[in-house]
Image (spheres, rainbow, N blue to C red):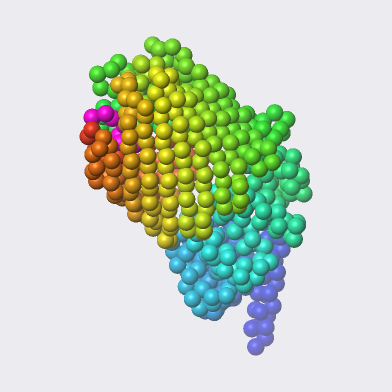
């Protein structure tokens, strides 16, 4: 009996020593203490929990999961351990398994908010935004003041492109919870996106210390030069091959509310029966925001190895009419870089592109778009697009109306239909195929009319994005279609296969 009492006292003393080592930041020493306790008493739940937590902290996720499972064997009804297993599983990027674990917990405990918070977070990570949003809304129905759910919902709204709705939720939450770091960080990111640097600095000021490294990262992003490299390649069955490599740099002067941009690109154009052509382009741009109006402008020029230099101009404005409805417009002038033939014919165009985007509900959106093109060969172009899409989890259906016409067919290298109309429906799937690999697959079927000829239309598409890291990724795509919108040729046979890809680096 005396031996058992002494052992209990020793274990209690060792647990206290382990906690003190943790508080001193001596994680390795604390792990050794907890491991020694478990050797003496394998069922000591306090030591098991602490050891599993420290393994997770040091990113030794396999060991953390092993210890958490041992803890769960000792305490089968320990909900915190079940949540921890799901959470560590998500940190090890086993997202599908983590989602399944959270849902298992919720089947038995549907109102357990920590499980719903974890599930909503992971659904957001894998870009199942509508499902993530539904979970956050369920949590807020249970507790309207759950601050992590408010922050999570605002983040998902931002990812969905509903920036104004995200900002309004962050501001409302900030009024109630000004001392929660996650609220300040989220609000600062929105202000940074809107180039409201003074607001960013004011919001971040209480967090600019070593305890909040993310705030320091945002500050560094404001002050640092941002570099991005992009390589694009597009090849189709008409014998055209276009390649581009662009290096862009973004920077600010004295923490101003405008972001300056310089980009330099080199490209090459190849086309059957034509001499290849090389291109260098330089562009100077400014991004900023006036109240809710977001502006992006640029001027520059295109230099060709055997053709005259062509100026280029770009202006984009976007304004949120409501939290779900936004209006945008683009004005641009540039060389018409469709292929070698259009460039040899010195084609350039002014293009005017008003558009409207309406997020009807969480799973449904409508997009309207019009383009007026004024070409320097005297041609005039009209395009109209109306597209609606609804999601059902990872699956989606959409409908498309498309009209396209030119005043004349100039025979200078680009497809200029006197009148073209298309209506089609599309079904598809979008989701994670492998770790860090997301794909979108779709089939579109309908009818199209051209030169008084009506025929069936089809478009098969596949696109995958692979993220090797936060700063390095690749996008690959394939499209097979008889839609002249994609093929852009005058032969009357619009069947076209296109392969394209982008390689992106950020520094």
Q: Residue at x 46, y 41 (%)?
A: 369
Residue 391: image location, x then y, percent: 43, 58
Q: Which portion, as a residue range, is magenta?
A: 484-491
Question: Left or right: where does residue 37 sit relative to residue 475?
Answer: right
Is 475 drawn above or below residue 133 in the view shown? above
Say if residue 240 shows up in the picture.
yes
Question: Left or right: where does residue 172 sit relative to residue 491?
Answer: right
The image quadrant that residue 417 belongs to is top left
Q: Is residue 489 magenta?
A: yes
Q: Residue at x 37, y 36 (%)?
A: 404
Nearer the observer, 28 or 458: 458
Q: Residue at x 49, y 76 (%)?
A: 107
The image quadrant that residue 390 belongs to is bottom left
Residue 187: image location, x then y, percent: 68, 50
Residue 117: image location, x then y, percent: 58, 65
Placement of the N terminus among the 4 image quadrants: bottom right
Question: Left or right: where does residue 426 sit relative to residue 36?
Answer: left
The image quadrant that residue 273 belongs to is top left
Placement of the C terminus among the 4 image quadrants: top right
Q: Is residue 391 magenta?
A: no
Say if residue 432 shows up in the picture.
no
């Amino acid at each position: 009996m005396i031996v058992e009492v002494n052992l209990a006292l020793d274990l209690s003393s060792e647990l206290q020593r382990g906690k003190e080592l943790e508080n001193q930041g001596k994680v390795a020493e604390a792990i050794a203490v907890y491991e020694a306790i478990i050797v003496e008493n394998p069922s000591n739940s306090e030591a098991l929990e602490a050891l599993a937590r420290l393994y997770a902290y040091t990113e030794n996720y396999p060991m953390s999961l092993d210890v958490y499972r041992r803890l769960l064997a000792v305490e089968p009804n320990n909900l915190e351990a079940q949540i921890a297993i799901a959470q560590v599983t998500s940190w090890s990027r086993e997202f599908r398994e983590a989602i399944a674990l959270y849902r298992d917990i919720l089947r038995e405990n549907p109102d357990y908010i920590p499980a719903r918070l974890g599930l909503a977070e992971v659904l957001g990570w894998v870009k199942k935004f509508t499902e993530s949003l539904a979970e956050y809304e369920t949590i807020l129905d249970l507790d309207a003041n759950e601050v992590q759910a408010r922050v999570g919902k605002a983040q998902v709204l931002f990812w969905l492109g509903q920036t104004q709705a995200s900002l309004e939720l962050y501001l409302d939450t900030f009024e109630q919870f000004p001392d929660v770091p996650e609220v300040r960080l989220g609000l600062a990111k929105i202000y940074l996106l809107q180039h409201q640097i003074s607001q960013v600095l004011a919001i971040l000021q209480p967090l600019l210390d070593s305890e909040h490294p993310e705030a320091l990262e945002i500050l560094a992003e404001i002050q640092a030069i941002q570099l991005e490299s992009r390589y694009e390649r597009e090849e189709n069955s008409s014998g055209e091959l276009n390649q581009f490599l662009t290096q862009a740099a973004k920077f600010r002067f004295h923490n101003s509310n405008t972001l300056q941009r310089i980009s330099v690109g080199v490209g090459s154009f190849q086309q059957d029966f034509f001499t290849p052509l090389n291109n260098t382009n330089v562009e100077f741009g400014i991004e900023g925001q006036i109240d809710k109006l977001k502006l992006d402008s640029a001027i520059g020029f295109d230099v060709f190895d055997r053709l005259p230099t062509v100026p280029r101009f770009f202006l984009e404005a976007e304004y949120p009419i409501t939290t779900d409805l936004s209006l945008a417009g683009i004005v641009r002038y540039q060389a018409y870089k469709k292929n070698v033939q259009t460039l040899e014919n010195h084609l350039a165009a002014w293009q005017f592109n008003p558009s409207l985007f309406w997020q009807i509900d969480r799973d449904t959106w409508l997009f309207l778009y019009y383009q007026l093109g004024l070409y320097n060969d005297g041609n005039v172009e009209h395009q109209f697009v109306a597209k609606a899409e609804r999601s059902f989890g990872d699956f989606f259906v959409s409908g498309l109306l498309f009209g396209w016409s030119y005043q004349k067919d100039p025979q200078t290298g680009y497809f200029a239909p006197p009148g073209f109309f298309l209506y089609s429906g599309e079904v598809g799937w979008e989701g994670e195929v492998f770790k860090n690999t997301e794909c979108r697959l779709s089939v579109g079927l309908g009818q199209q009319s051209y030169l008084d000829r009506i025929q069936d239309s089809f478009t098969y598409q596949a696109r995958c994005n692979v993220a090797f890291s936060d700063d390095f990724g690749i996008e690959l795509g394939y499209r097979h279609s008889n839609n002249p919108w994609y093929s852009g040729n005058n032969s009357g046979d619009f069947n076209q296969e296109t392969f394209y890809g982008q390689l992106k680096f950020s520094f």
